[in-house]
Amino acid sequence: MPGTVQSIERAAAILRVVARARDPLGVTDIAQAVGLAKTTTHGLLRTLLQVGFVQQDRATGRYTVGTGLLRLGDPLDLNEVRARSSNWADALAARSGHTVRLATLAGADEVVVVHHVFRPDDSAQVLEVGTALPARTTGLGKVLLAHAPEARRPTGSWATELAEVRARGWGVDRGEHEPERGCIAAPVRGPGGPVVAALGINGPVTVLFDGRGAPRPVLLGMVTDAAAAVSRELGHGGG
Amino acid sequence: MPQYVVAIDQGTTSTRCMIFDHGGAVVSVGQKEHEQIFPRAGWVEHDALEIWRNTREVVGQAIARSEAGASDIVAIGITNQRETAVVWDRKTGQPVYNAIVWQDTRTTKIIEELGALGGGADRYKDKVGLPLATYFAGPKVRWILDNVDGARERAERGELLMGTIDSWLIWNMTGGADGGQHLTDVSNASRTMLMDYRTLAWDESIAEEMGIPLAMLPEIRSNSEEYGQGRKAGFLAGVPISGSLGDQQAATFGQVCFERGMAKNTYGTGNFMLLNTGEEAVPSQNGLLTTLCYQLGDGKPVYALEGSIAVTGSLVQWVRDNLGMIKSAPEIEDLARSVDDNGGAYFVPAFSGLFAPHWRGDARGAVVGLTRYVNKGHLARAVLEATAYQTREVLDAMNADSGVDLTELRVDGGMVGNELLMQFQADLLDVPVIRPKIAETTALGAAYAAGLAVGFWSDLDELTAKWAEDKRWEPQMPAEERERNYRNWQKAVTKSLDWVDEDVR
Amino acid sequence: MADRYVLAVDQGTTSTRSLVFDRGGRMVAVRQREHRQYFPRPGWVEHDPMEIWANTRRTAAQVLADVGGAGEVVALGIANQRETTVVWERATGRPVLRALVWQDTRTAELVAELVARPEAPLVRERSGMATAGYFSGPRLRWILEHVPRAQERAERGELLFGTMETWLIWNLTGGPDGGVHVTDVTNASRTLLMDVRTCRWDPDLLAFFGIPAAMLPEIRPSVGVLGVATALPQALPITGALGDQQAALFGQACFAPGEAKCTYGTGSFLLQNTGTELVHTRSGSISTVAYQLAGEPVHYALEGSVAVTGALVQWLRDGLGLIGSAPEVETLARTVDDNGGCYVVPAFSGLLAPHWRGEARGLVAGLTSYVTKGHLARAVLEATGWQTRDVVQAMAADSGLSLPALRVDGGMTTNNLLMQFIADVLDTPVVRPMVGETVSLGAAYAAGLAVGIWSDVEALRRNWHRAAQWTPSRGRAEALDAEYPRWERAVQLSIAWGAPPEPGVR
């Protein structure tokens, strides 16, 4: 039988103490209650704070149970996803020079735009937040379908293409949704790893892709980096 | 063999049956909730047949759960949600419409029209002791006659009967279409706007103005006398039905407020304070209702001043259901105790206007005095304090109307378990607040009235001797602080007024 | 040759951030540290200046390390929370007490007393601003009155006064050991002690507030050399400093008269460039210094400050616990279609522009049993929109300048429901720029302009790009016009709450 992980055990003990307390607790109280050194307790609390399992009152420094723990298992709030992705999405638009969209799966065949940053050329553009796009013909949709729970994934010839998208960590469309225009998209992961959204740039096919239809590496790198940064921002630990 | 009295407490959300022994102790209880029907905003209805079914069911439950058989039961007392009106067919026992509940505000237009005939809200006040308001039963009956096809003609032909819930239950319990007694008691009749509180008779001119045929009105009787006996097919066949009181009057009776100057305050969804004014009916100059307190057999009627507050306990429910700030109502006290005071915040819960002593339909809820420092703990305190402040307003009005300052307040109802509220209440009123040992004062009052009529209990002194104090809260707040807080509250009330106008309905 | 970068320090109300920008105005690196908020009594808000200095030093060092050899950081610019007041010992660098934050209302009584004096009109005449507890002069007066011997020590030159940029520049340039004691003209204009026309400390104002000249920093242009930061791992010329809202105006490239921005943060700050002429205000907006380039005339702006906007959402989260995170307010608001008839006036510590009523207190009006937390969330967001409208109307009355579009930035601009509501309630397009970090970008622009990274303001204008635009919905403006009196009524109630009891109330 495998042994237990000590720090998880200790963190669980701390959470129990904090959760049962009637009033917010200071680090000294908590350390005493779980029988650990203050510094050890402090270290564990800092990690718990980071993942949102405890929260700290700014004025008193005391701890209570965090909303992250209360909402364990709740889906990620999409308005929060937009707020947290905003800086990275802006930077992606500024660097790439293309329209940026963040989308999430809505039903089996559609994705809905959660966040949209204009192409930085100051031309007239319309905010697309809330707009639905087809899932199967957009890079954003393919990324989301590829990472959807198995029951929601399309089958047949699609399965192969989606498996590929899943394996390489990005998806594209080349004029499949709008003529001459295409998209490069990458998955955004929430805490614990599930894909919660897709982030992508949208622009002329000839600019986004090379002669053989492969996404230009510089742009692809920008998209996957930005998606990884947003994932980190959302609390996804891994790279 | 021990003997018992049955009390049926037909309330706004549920019907209960309680069996009391001679000592006034509860030996068993049956209870069932009924559906709240909200056909439109501001409309509240109950299915009168469901209420009658539930009444039979809870009586059965209570008897089954006790050692008593029907033969051990000497009397039945009834107490009921007041002002809720039913109109039914004398021949079939079928209601022509759902019961229109006291909280229902559909009669706003009828009220305005009647007021426009002259005298405004005080048009009938000299005779009935009440201001024109949607709260009372008469206009609700008028609405049914106006809006149910053929109802008015049938009522004029004597085919329809009207009643508050006490009438509806007594009629059914004494046989219904088969010889049921159509009567009501003085306390319920005093809430219809149709009874002259001096003569204790229906006022024909008001009934005519309100368009209610006299033929459909029940006979007015005292609160304690034999009205009839349980129908043959029922659980309580042959048992005398001998007590009936509206719920707030029943609570006053259960709190043994038999002396002039004694008062009780019930903390429920709303609050109801009744002050016994003896054999003198005191007209209110300060926004209170003049109402019947009780009349025993052919004794002289005893009157009360009443202060009704629409929203007290239901504000706690609102914080629970609409804001989700607490999971259960009692949690409000824990939350309130997380802080030392209200942080400067005041909550005026004028959700659909203010009742006593303001009677302002144009008011709407307001929270004032918010700063960054105010948190949900402070808000919870403000919520509890709102009940206490509103009670203070009513008490001040009582003192002004009666000319005698109340020296203590007896309390009952759901919120009296809240220590924080009760202490604050005592602080704010500057009189002791006292909770009795038997908290079920409403059902007890009905049982007392029924038992007196059949000689189960001999007189009021015997009942008075049974009352025992459970807990007393003494005022502790310095006068200056009390009055400053109260001034803030009064100011807060002014911020809730005048909100509704042509723009906001 | 490596790229040339600029370091910006954004010393804000809740945190201190250090950011590095490239020539394109793009953020290259960022570090941030929050500091503790002290609420010793209702209405009091304090920060620990030592903590803020430590956070500045630490984040700046980190961000310089993050950049490493990728580029050469050549200048430092500072943007700071305005009106927050620090007094410290020249000899030791120790603050005599914690900083009094701009939200702090302890000076209310003092201000009432000052306003009652016959010479009081002088303040508006010279400083361009009303005598209000919001500005730093009264806070400084409060400190001199409440810290033992502070007045005499200040007169002897033992104590120094500064807003946050002054405190940081003094520490960055050596502290007790030769630190430069300077302030920028935008920050100085917020003290009530400076003549807004000459941009010098005014002796009459100093006399009015009882402030010894010996403790005041030297007033400098916002763009130009202020000193050399020697306390960082790499010595950097400090060549830009602006109050945070002026920095945002600069970062939003609002260089022409009429151009305006609104920053939606804890509070909201709407500034409209009015050029080199000072506008006389009558309607509740204030005239303030926008920026000054060394050797050039001062540019002015009209400002409308709203104390509580984002802070109201935080209150919903922290005070009431109705939401888990600030962005969730939009999710909650979208559970219903309207405000259910309720209005929230977040006058938590009085109302600023355009009402300037310190006695007002927060209020929720129009509650019925129908109102849920969803309606409340909508009312919370709408409060920001209504308050923006109040300010825009006042400014239009004062300046006569029209508002072709409102440039927005700050944390609340990711809230779509709110941004659309603002476009609707103003009946004006609302535009968000690509770089949301306008405050720090403005500081970087100021610093970079002084050392020649950018040639002139036109070069900065070319860096500005639109990231999103909200256009007024058809028909909504009329509906909201009709609703506006409800809001105004609620505002009047919140003001009346703080007023002395009416004669009718016993």
Image (cartoon, coloured by chain):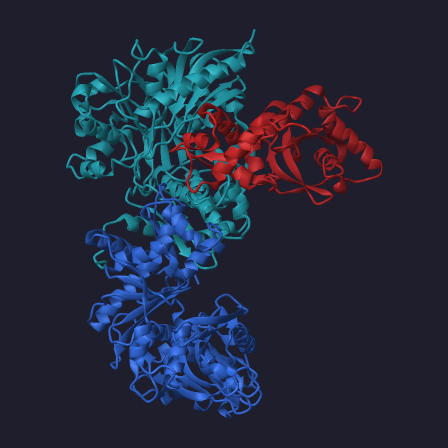
* Residue at the spot 48% in from the left edge and 32% down from the top edge: A34
Determine the residue positioned at 40% across, 49% down. B334
Which residue occupies the extreme front position in the image?
B1
What hue represents chain B?
Answer: blue
When asked about the image quadrant of residue A131, the answer is top right
Quadrant containing the N terminus of chain A is top right
Say whether residue C308 is visible. Answer: yes
Whether residue C443 sits left or right of residue B421 in the image: it is right
Q: Which chain is depicted red?
A: A
Vertical position of residue C27 compared to residue B481: above or below: above
Q: Residue C163 appears at what percent x and percent y?
A: 32, 24
Q: Is residue B12 left or right of residue B384?
A: right
Above or below, C219 relative to C34: above
**Residue B494 visible at all:** no
Image coords of residue C484 (percent x, y): 42, 51
Picture coordinates of residue B364 (x, y %)?
Answer: 39, 59
Q: Quadrant of residue A160?
A: top right
**Camera-nearest residue between B314 and C502:** B314
Task: Check the image and name the residue furthest to the right.
Answer: A157
Q: Colour of chain C?
A: cyan
Q: Is the C terminus of chain A in the top left, top right, bottom left or bottom right quadrant? A: top right
Relative to B367, say whether A28 is above or below. Answer: above
Residue A82, x across and y down, in percent: 57, 36
For this rendering, which residue is in front, C1 or C292? Answer: C1
